[in-house]
Amino acid sequence: MKVFTLAFVVSVVTAASLPTLRCRDSTYRFVGRVNPETKELTWPSTGVAFSFTGTTASININSVRGTASVSLYIDGNEPIVIPSIDGSPIRTPTLPLGNHTVEIRKRSETNFGTFRITNVTTDGTFAPSVAPTRKIEIIGDSISVGYGLDGVLPCTDTALLQNNPKTYGAVAAQALGADYSVVAWSGKGLVRNYASNPPDTQPPMPVVYTRYGANDEDDSFTFPSSWVPDAVVINLGTNDFSYLNVREPVNPAALIEALSALIESIHAQYEDAQFFLVSSPLLSDYWPTIEDAQKTTHIRVLQTVIERLDALKIHFVDWPTQGSDVGCDYHPNEATQAQGADLLIEAIQTALGW
Ligand SMILES: *[C@@H]1O[C@H](CO)[C@@H](O)[C@H](O)[C@H]1NC(C)=O
Ligand SMILES: *[C@@H]1O[C@H](CO)[C@@H](O)[C@H](O)[C@H]1NC(C)=O
């Protein structure tokens, strides 16, 4: 309650005293989950989108922390990759005089680095930029981040080797003409994070999901009515299953409870959204032991949740265990992510008639 009151006061004060903030709405819009109070790009896939008539535009930034890699899309073409944001503006090349659309999307996740948007400038004039009507939210772990996606095992994951725009969720959204937001964080689980020694005591994904920016306070996200997803895609559980030499195998009943609670809390905010529960290409029935049958056990968790919450529209997306071509630390590469995208596209088309 205290946080909400504070945020409300701040927004009233800035709106009254800084008229430039009003111009902001007509010059660019944020994509992904970006707290408008901080304008900090944290989650993978966050960025800005705008349209202009002219030859060049700049996205001006400050407060750079760490390293972030960004994809810059101009007029819907293949992106220009910016390997490392260093505080200098993200500029378009000089383009033919005319109308252009620009969108940036962060390729890498919060832990590698974040930065803040100050403003967007152009040598021409801005034109209205409207988000696509179709909207998809993706909630997940490293699979949904695109951890190590552009690497080839063996490799070390870096901001540049992460490639969120090539993850199953982003690729599906682009193919369906939908806007998308990715709320994902490598290593996060439903009830416990990736097994490590010493143990990871940070909160799991259902808690982190309630944050506006990824490093903001818990429960800071306001679920603004300006961006309500039609489809909510959840791909969680892989990290809960990790245990070898660190802890006991996870109790599937705990996963069922946590996933049900997460879905119900999101449904309370997005009443009309349909849910898509995606199985894990990283889990296998043969590792670490045949007795664990992790792939099948995870699928049973998802299917039990679907049966239990039968009043809601929840669909299962069966993403098979990946093959031997993988990215850093055995993460899905571009081809595996594309396979996941095709499965998600089919499920969303069937359910939503897109
Ligand atoms: C845009 O932001 C930059 C800092 O990133 C600042 O130097 C510049 O004055 C701002 N321009 C406008 C038009 O507000
Ligand atoms: C460029 O955009 C302007 C307004 O945003 C519009 O009036 C004009 O028709 C557009 N030109 C072309 C060639 O599409």
Image (spheres, rainbow, N blue to C red):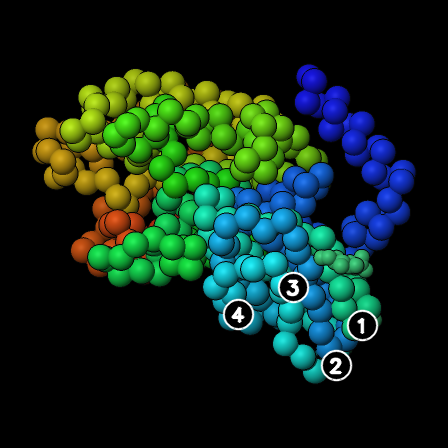
Q: Which of the two discs, 3 and 2, labels the residue nearer the N terminus? A: 3
Q: Residues within 10 Å of mark 3 (few under 14, many from 20)?
A: some
Circle nearer the N terminus (4, 2): 4
- Residue 220: which quarter of the image? top right
Camera-nearest label, 3 or 2: 3
Looking at marks 1 and 3 on the same chain, the residue that comes earlier in the sequence is marked by 3
- Disc 4 + disc 1, Cβ < 8 Å: no
Front label number (1 vs 3): 3
**In front of the other: 156 or 297:** 156
Q: Which residue is mark 1?
A: 124
Q: Secondary structure at mark 2?
A: loop
> What percent of the width, then of the height, locates residue 300?
27, 28
Q: CA distance from mark 4 to mark 1?
A: 21 Å
User: Are the residues flagged by discs 3 and 2 in contact, CB closer than 8 Å?
Assistant: no
Q: Are marks 1 and 3 in contact (CB under 8 Å)?
A: no
In the depicted structure, whether residue 301 falls above or below residue 118: above
Frontmost of labels 4 and 2 is 4
Q: Nearer the viewer, mark 4 or mark 3?
A: 3
Residue at the spot 66% in from the left edge and 30% down from the top edge: 222
Residue pointed to by mark 2: 97
Point out which mark residue 176 bears. none
Report helix, strand or loop for mark 3. Answer: loop
Res. 176 in view: no
Amino acid type of the residue tagged 4 in the rendering: Ile
Residue pointed to by mark 4: 80
Residues under numbered marks 1 and 2 in contact, where contact means CB atoms less than 8 Å apart: yes
SS class of the residue under badge 1?
loop
Q: Residue at x 52, y 65 (%)?
A: 82
